[in-house]
Amino acid sequence: MKSIVDNRREQHLRYLEMISQYGEHLHEKNNVLTEKGFSNRLNTDTRINAKGRDERITAVESVTGKKINFLNGRHALNDLSLLEGNIENYIGMTSVPTGVIGPVLVTGIDAHGEFYVPLATSEGALVASFHRGAKACYLAGGASAVCTNEAVQRCPVFKFENLAALGGFLAWLFPNIDGFSDIVAQNSRYAKLLDVKANIEGNHLTLVFDYQTGDASGQNMVTLCTDAICRYIMEHSPVKPLSWYVEGNFSGDKKATAVSFTHVRGKKVTAEIALPKQVVADVLKTTPQAIADYWCASTIGAIQSGAIGAQGHYANGLAALFLATGQDVACVAEAATGITRMECGATGDLYASITLPNLIVGTVGGGTGLPTQRECLEMMDCYGPGKANKFAEICAAVLLAGELSIAAALAAGHFSAAHKNLGRKTQ
């Protein structure tokens, strides 16, 4: 069994190698694609009728080669056993309208090519906004996106009589931590323990367990593994804590925290693009300088508000993506923190990037196997083992598109009109 140090080194080297070889993964692409190259793609379509729906379904199924029989209502969920492990006191399904944007053109380590991305939302104008941003990115040659790190935490807390007892506990604990990897292996086929850190507050000790969780988002996985480790500790430690809890509210689970923001929780992903000024003018209806100026002003506002990070509306895109693809939607609370940056280059073009340090996503387990959620993942070829990093890179590209579109709308003074035209009932 590999030691924790070996696991951590292996993951660190794997990501360094992937990032260092990223240039080899880049597609040969023109700096700017023609509008004609997008002409046979999905257009923004406000028709809410059977004809418009059926045309879009035909187009998406034709391009992706995937059927969406449950999503479009051709098939019904009759086997309720599929819901076991996902719901209690079941009474029925809550339907959320689902749209599609794309193609989202991504050049990543795991995600290469064009993707049609489902977004489930009841907020008018959201799908149109992300679709517009995706079009701008497509015409600029696509977004570059890479995963740079991953870890999921569980943080049990132990209470002792005093600091002396706490110190004696630690003196026994750290020489024995490599044996914890065996416990993890006994409780999970996929989890790997990467690190154990200590945080001391008075007579309270919080242990931070970092795990790699494969292609699952991993919260349940790390809880079960950590619980088993804690029970082993309680049985074998010569110094017994007065009490302990498997989570001491330090991990950042379901909340935005500075600790997670400065490290990683889930997957850390970054994406970038350079938008030529002509694309900004033609698609986003403004100028690179206007967008950069707005973003400077909005970042100052975020700082004054005490926000963790500085971004426009990650939560909009993440919530819609998470609902569509069976992710734990409550994790938007932590995943929607990050940094968006926009600036004018020397040529007058617009450089934009986003960094997401807390992207909790999975392509196996949880709600990913439910019928419509599985279809949405399959639409992007992101269902099943070996697809989590690919999905994370697509998520980053989608959020970058959303940031560009909302920044352009606000910079050009179109934000209110868009919501008036698309976010209201016509009758």
Image (cartoon, rainbow, N blue to C red):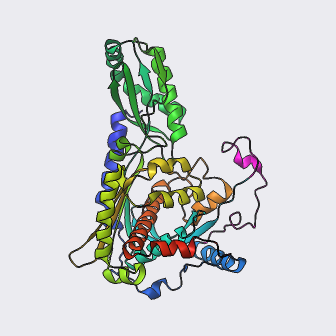
The quadrant where residue 170 appears: top left
Asked if residue 189 is positioned above or below residue 163 in the image, the reply reads: below
Identify the magenta region. Answer: 65-92
Q: Quadrant of the C terminus?
A: bottom right
Main SS class of the magenta portion in the image: loop
The residue drawn where x is 74% and y is 66% is 73
Residue at 36% from the left image edge and 83% from the top image edge: 281
**Figure label count:** 0
Most foreground residue, 7 or 90: 90
Image coordinates of residue 101 in percent, x first then y, are 53, 71
Q: Position of residue 312 (x, y in %)?
A: 40, 61
| In this rendering, position of residue 61 left or right of residue 412 | right
Q: Nearer the viewer, residue 264 or 12?
A: 264
In magenta segment, residue 84: yes
Instruction: Determine the residue located farthest toward the right in the rendered image.
Output: 78
Which image quadrant: the N terminus? top left
Q: Nearer the viewer, residue 99 or 153?
A: 99
In the image, is residue 145 part of the stretch drawn in magenta?
no
In this picture, is 234 found above or below 92? above
Image side of residue 404 versus residue 40, left or right: left
Q: Position of residue 242 (x, y in %)?
A: 45, 14
* Residue 125 visible in rendering: yes
Q: Would residue 102 be seen by someone viewing this image from the given angle?
A: no
Outermost residue toward the left? 346
Q: Position of residue 309 (x, y in %)?
A: 35, 52
